Image (spheres, rainbow, N blue to C red):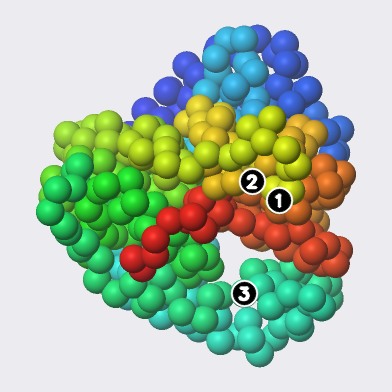
Amino acid sequence: MSQIKEIASSIKALENDLSLCTRCGMCQSVCPLYTETGREPDSARGKLALLDGLRFSLLSKPDGVMDLLQRCLLCGACASHCPRKVNSISVFLRARMIIAGITGLNPFKKAILRAACNNPRVFDMILDTAGFFQKKLSADIAGTSDFSCIRDGFRSKQRISRNFAPKSFSEITGTVDYRRQGSKGRVAFYPGCLVNRMYPSIGTASLNAIIDCGYDVVIPDGLVCCGMPAAASGDMGSARIAAEKNAEILKKTDCDLIVTSCPTCGYAMKKLWSVFAEKSGHNDSFDYVSEKISDISDFIIRYGEKKYTAPGPDSGSDDRKTVTVHDPCHLKRSLGIYKEPRIILEMAGYKVREMKNSDRCCGMGGTFSISHYDLSMSVAEEKKKAVMDSGADVLAAACPACMMQIGGGLAADGSEIDVRHPVEIYAEKIPNVF
């Protein structure tokens, strides 16, 4: 009975959100999926209109509605261009939650999400197993050791996949509780799943950057996934567990700031945890994290000493490496950060060469790239072309998921463009503690 009441309450809240949309169609011009397919249901307007007309079908035809909602990257382009300020990401997450509450999730998928959001040891075991089978089932891509092709047994097609790192970030660093006299303050670093298992070099670069800015740094024990993958799947139960668990752990650190190098994690922590866990009694902890969370590039600009500057225009020959910048959706649109990565790249001595449509979604969309692989890679084509047309030596993308998507596509095309996180480039010029 309580679950039915919760679902009914959520549907009522959904009705209020849907009433804001005037069907003007502004979202179509910026939706990467609509650009690829031309299908009205792939735009935010199409989804909102169908949800408004099929509110009662959420109960009678939940699977069909969920299929529609899953064809969304949750990039936020529609919301950022909406004249009525419809928070479409929140609407779609809430609708997915309602449907998952009616139909239930696939037990295997739910077990993985629950492990990621509640039990890091079990989740590590699952990822270790996945890494083992990846090695057995994958084929190398010429010219790179970072990506491989895994055969999709259901469709006999090759899928590009980022290889698991030989050692995870947590294995490389061990327990992190760095202290020294005269520090400016204390920072808690939240690595996130992809940094931990796919890109540990982003984590070590972030730690070195925090220390170079004059701060102590700690990674508290027991942190789990930020909960965004669970929320995107409609599993608000697991997302709620993750939000509450992480928020309580981070609050106990009593740090001055909380830093992450994954914008999806930062977005979830700053703006969505209180949504994941409405009426949970942990609002004080959510507010604590939201007020203190900072992306690593923003942290360096705000709290660093800006020691490193690039040559000016009158410094003679300019033989700096060129870097083009991809703006991750959750970093620019959700958190409003886009100048800072460029500044720290210039501080590191690189010359920024802008690509066309730098803030267009790369097509990753988290689990979207798994469930809709072909469409995901189709969206990525324009991004790959923009990167290569820029003529830059390096692509900087301040999101590990975007690095996986774009880097895999470039590697498959035989491109020699290096894909790196801005903090990795910045850290080339600072002392290494980790």
Please tell me which of labels 2 and 1 falls first in the chain: 1
Secondary structure at numbered mark 3: loop
Query: Which amino acid type is marked by label 1?
Result: Lys
Q: Residue 434 at what x, y percent from top left?
A: 36, 68
Q: Residue at x 56, y 30 (%)?
A: 339
- Using the numbered discs, state the Cα–Cα distance from disc 2 to disc 1 in whole angstroms: 5 Å
Q: Quadrant of residue 296?
A: top left
Q: Is residue 152 above or below residue 114?
A: below
Q: Is residue 101 above or below residue 407?
A: above
Q: Residue at x 83, y 62 (%)?
A: 415
Query: Which amino acid type is marked by label 3?
Result: Asn
Q: Which residue is mark 3?
A: 163
Residue in front for this viewpoint, 47 or 24: 24
Front: mark 3 or 1:
1
Residue in front for this viewpoint, 278 or 271: 271
Please tell me which of labels 3 and 1 falls first in the chain: 3
Secondary structure at numbered mark 2: loop
The quarter in which the N terminus is drawn is top left
Q: Residue at x 46, y 79 (%)?
A: 167
Number of on-image labels: 3
Please tell me which of labels 3 and 2 falls first in the chain: 3
Q: Residue at x 22, y 53 (%)?
A: 216
Query: Which amino acid type is marked by label 2?
Result: Tyr
Q: Quadrant of residue 123?
A: bottom left
Q: Which residue is mark 2?
A: 350
Q: Which residue is mark 1?
A: 321
Residue 11 badge: none
- Using the numbered discs, state the Cα–Cα distance from disc 3 to disc 1 in whole angstroms: 27 Å
Q: Residue 252 at what x, y percent from top left?
A: 13, 50
